[in-house]
Image (cartoon, helix red, strand yellow):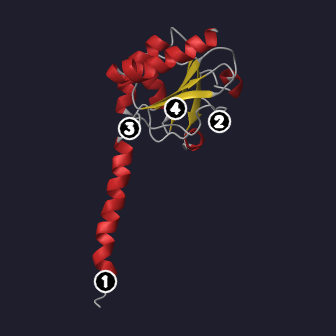
Amino acid sequence: MARLSPLVVLPPAIFAGLAAMFLWGMNRENPGENPSALAGREAPAVPVQTLPDKVQLTDAMLREPGVKLVNFWASWCPPCRVEHPVLMDLSQELPVYGVALRDNPDNALAFLAEGGDPYHAIGDDPRGRTAIDWGVTAPPETFIVDGNGRILYRFAGPIVGADYENRFRPELDRALAAEAQ
């Protein structure tokens, strides 16, 4: 009886496992979405420092009545620059809070002076510790938070164009409607 070498069986077995995993991933309800483990849970702590001459973001602000957004951003982040006008518009509709992620304070302030400041308050996260607690992978990321300080939705990437219209805005409208009831 001939013995089958494990080196002959291993590559096809690995390939079959990866193929099954990719097939499962493509057939999820929304394969482009990166779900948040924090959805439905209380928002983690915010940074204890802010940028010079800016209002300090506090945990209490996230628990005030009404829907609000928490946006992780950086001046060195090109997609953050692209979404900035959308945040300016949204800040006329509801509170938008910002967390400057691993940014030089002077550069962050220059960015806000150039494009306008949509943030009602800002936290400064120079080492990215807060971002880790929130599950942020890279800026920009925006969280919809309810009036009890619970995360309702996480959006990774810039909130612009079709992503804004088809993914982010429906979630925001759903949150605003639930809060109005």
Residue lying at the far right of the rendered structure = 60
Q: Residues within 10 Å of mark 3 (few under 14, many from 20)?
A: few
Which residue is more in the foreground, 50 or 24?
Answer: 24
Residue 55 location, quadrant: top right
Per the image, the residue denoted by label 3 is 31
Q: CA distance from mark 2 to mark 1?
A: 51 Å
Residue at the spot 58% in from the left edge and 44% down from the top edge: 129
Image x and y of residue 69, in percent: 55, 22
- Do labels 2 and 3 touch, CB within 8 Å? no
Q: Nearer the viewer, mark 3 or mark 4?
A: 3
Q: CA distance from mark 2 to mark 4?
A: 16 Å
Q: Earlier in the sequence, mark 2 or mark 1?
A: 1
How many labels were placed on the picture? 4
* Residue at the image position 45 percent from the left and 38 percent from the top: 34
**Quarter of image, res 146:** top right
Question: Looking at the image, is mark 2 or mark 3 earlier in the sequence?
Answer: 3
N-terminal of the pair, mark 4 or mark 1, is 1
Q: Is residue 118 visible?
A: no
Q: Which residue carries the number 2 mark?
A: 44
The label shown at residue 5 is 1
- Which label belongs to residue 100? 4
Of tags 2 and 3, which is closer to the observer? 3
Task: Report the front residue among 12 and 75.
Answer: 12
Q: Nearer the viewer, mark 4 or mark 1?
A: 1
- What kind of residue is marked 4? Ala
Q: Amino acid at mark 2?
A: Pro
**Residue depicted at 60% across the width and 17% down the height:** 67
Picture coordinates of residue 68, whole percent (x, y): 58, 19
Q: Tag 3, which secondary structure?
A: loop
**Circles 2, 1 touching at the beta carbon (< 8 Å):** no
